[in-house]
Amino acid sequence: MKRLIASFSVLFLFLVFGAVYYYTSNPMETDENQVTSAGDGQETEDLIQVGLIQFISHDSLDAISQGAIDALSDYDYVDEETISLDLQNGQGDQSNLSSISTQFVNGEMDLIIAVATPAAQAAANATGEIPIVLAGITDPEAAGLVASNEQPETNVSGVSDMTPVAEQLELIRQLHPEAEKLGVIYASSEVNGQIQADLAEELAADYGFTPVIQTVSSTNDVNQVSQQLAEEVDVMWIPNDNIVASAFPTVIENASAAGVAVYPAVDIMVAQGGLATIGINQYQLGYQAGMMAVRVLQDGTDLSTTPVEQASQFDLVINFEQAERLNVDIPDEMAEEAIDAASLESGDD
């Protein structure tokens, strides 16, 4: 009897050790083991698909894109956690923009954010169904993106970057009481710049300026045109224009050599050598557009009935170092109110 019990004990131990060996060598497949990681254990295809298309690389548009991304993140739409964010830059090439937009459509994006007019036009040409939130488009209606800015009636809406031209001309007049000729440069291919330049031309006489307007077709023209213009005028004003913005250091170099102050439409360009502006805070504009994107993702907001918004934050920004170089006196009251452009350059503001 003892021998039989011993035999059963040996058999039992053999089975136990055999089972342990089998399961350690061949672990059971669980749901966790079957999931492909997307940063937090979610499958990539389960994440909300968001595409961001930017026309070209320069500081102003980069700030808009970052603002939109930060707004999404602040409301828990974080890349590789709750969304899959595809960031693309057309590098100023229309064929690139078209290809990127087609890729977004084929990738079944849930939402597209388009930064600058050419990017928005490419995205809108590619799809009439995927919601497209615009950022940095002066007049979406004039650009053919919406039926009207008040009632888009398309899959498109967003935030305009229409600059306060009258306030900017008034600022220039305050700081240059003797100036007569106002130089303006914009790209002939950009609706944004043309709309603002036309408005500046219309308003110039109200502030005692004679406008001298020149156009460029590409960044290659900016050096020659800005050099000639700087020698002809007393002061320069630059609208929201992506081609000119991409070559803005060249404009500053030529204008400074001629002793001419440059007043750009947006804040960041003051930090790049412009003298001053009452301009759009580009980062905040992007954040505002990002908030519209959040409403689309969170609440299913219908862009076809969502009016195009205007930029909500305009800042007085002064480059005090440039003012000193060009012997431009800044009134104490204005200096106290202004944001120092150096803080934008260092990322403090």
Image (cartoon, rainbow, N blue to C red):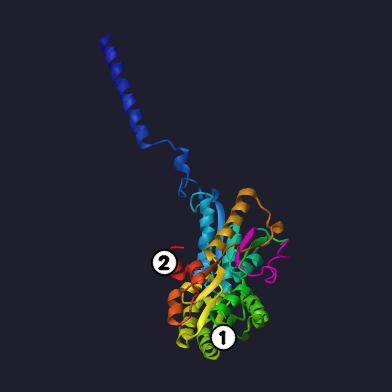
Pointer 2: what residue?
Answer: 346
Q: Is residue 144 magenta?
A: yes
Q: Is residue 296 left or right of residue 284?
A: right
Residue projecting furthest to the top:
1
Pointer 1: what residue?
Answer: 179
Q: CA distance from mark 2 to mark 1?
A: 32 Å
Compare residues 298 and 265 and report the one nearer the observer: 265
- Amino acid type at image mark 2: Ser
Mark 2, mark 1: which one is toward the viewer? 1
Place of residue 201 in the rendered image (x, y in percent of width and height, measured from the top left)? 65, 82
Place of residue 242 in the rendered image (x, y in percent of width and height, measured from the top left)? 55, 74
- Amino acid type at image mark 1: Ala
Q: Is residue 256 left or right of residue 241?
A: left
Dot 2 falls on a residue whose secondary structure is: loop
Q: Splitting the image into 4 quarters, where does residue 50 fall?
A: bottom right
Boundaries of the magenta span: 130-151
Up the image or down, 188 lies above or below 161; here it is: below
Crowd band around label 2 with a 10 angstrom C-alpha radius: few (<14), some (14–19), many (20+): few
